[in-house]
């Protein structure tokens, strides 16, 4: 059970990080004038809601499985995402994105740093749960062999 949780969290968080990194690349292309503002807004806006949903699901899973440290780490960003969504500020406006690309980029860079810290913790917990799973399996095999002799 524990191994499944951390493997799922690892994969979902990897997808969230890839999405955020892609958004950073798109904003860098906008600053370098390699992409127009309409394409930038449409590419980033189509990724925003799935990212928010994935972050909310991870936070809820940590709450339901009683992983309090991870829940308390992820809940502030989830609440911020919910606030942005309900204030209708989660999508990039075509007229504002060209005026404030550095602010949008800075916001996503800070978010990417946060995701990187959480990803490191999830990776450690995944490795620890794999080790525990394998050591328990070896111990069960050892007991089984002892009972046969």
Image (cartoon, rainbow, N blue to C red):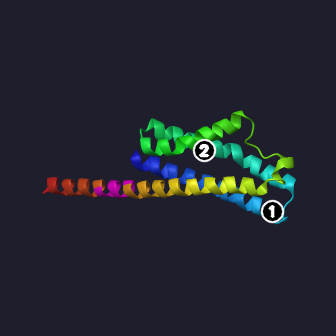
Residue range highlighted in magenta? 129-135
- Give the number of the disc on residue 51: none
Q: Residues within 10 Å of mark 2 (few under 14, many from 20)?
A: some
Query: What is the x, y in percent for residue 26?
Result: 76, 59
- Give the number of the disc on residue 31: 1
Indicate left or right for 49 with 59 as reference: right
Image height of 90 relative to 6, above or below:
above
**Residue matched to label 2:** 54
Quadrant assignment for the N terminus: top left
Image height of 68 relative to 117, above or below:
above
Q: Tell me the residue at 27%/58% (across/down).
A: 138
Q: Tell me the residue at 52%/37% (across/down).
A: 60
Query: What is the x, y in percent for residue 107?
Result: 68, 52
Q: Is 116 in front, or is 105?
A: 105
Indicate yes or no whether the magenta region holds residue 134.
yes
Q: Is 16 in front, or is 30?
A: 30
Which structural element holds mark 1?
helix
Q: Quadrant of residue 90?
A: top right
């Amino acid at each position: 059970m524990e191994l499944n949780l951390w493997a799922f969290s690892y994969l979902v968080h990897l997808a969230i990080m890839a999405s955020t990194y892609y958004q950073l690349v798109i904003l860098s292309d906008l600053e370098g004038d390699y992409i127009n503002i309409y394409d930038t807004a449409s590419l980033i806006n189509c990724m925003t809601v799935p990212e928010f949903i994935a972050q909310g699901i991870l936070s809820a899973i940590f709450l339901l499985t009683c992983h309090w440290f991870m829940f308390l780490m992820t809940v502030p960003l989830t609440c911020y995402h919910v606030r942005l969504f309900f204030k209708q500020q989660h999508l990039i406006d075509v007229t504002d994105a060209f005026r404030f690309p550095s602010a949008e980029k800075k916001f996503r860079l800070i978010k990417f740093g946060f995701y990187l810290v959480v990803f490191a913790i999830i990776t450690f917990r995944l490795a620890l749960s794999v080790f525990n799973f394998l050591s328990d399996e070896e111990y069960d095999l050892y007991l089984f062999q002892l009972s046969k002799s």
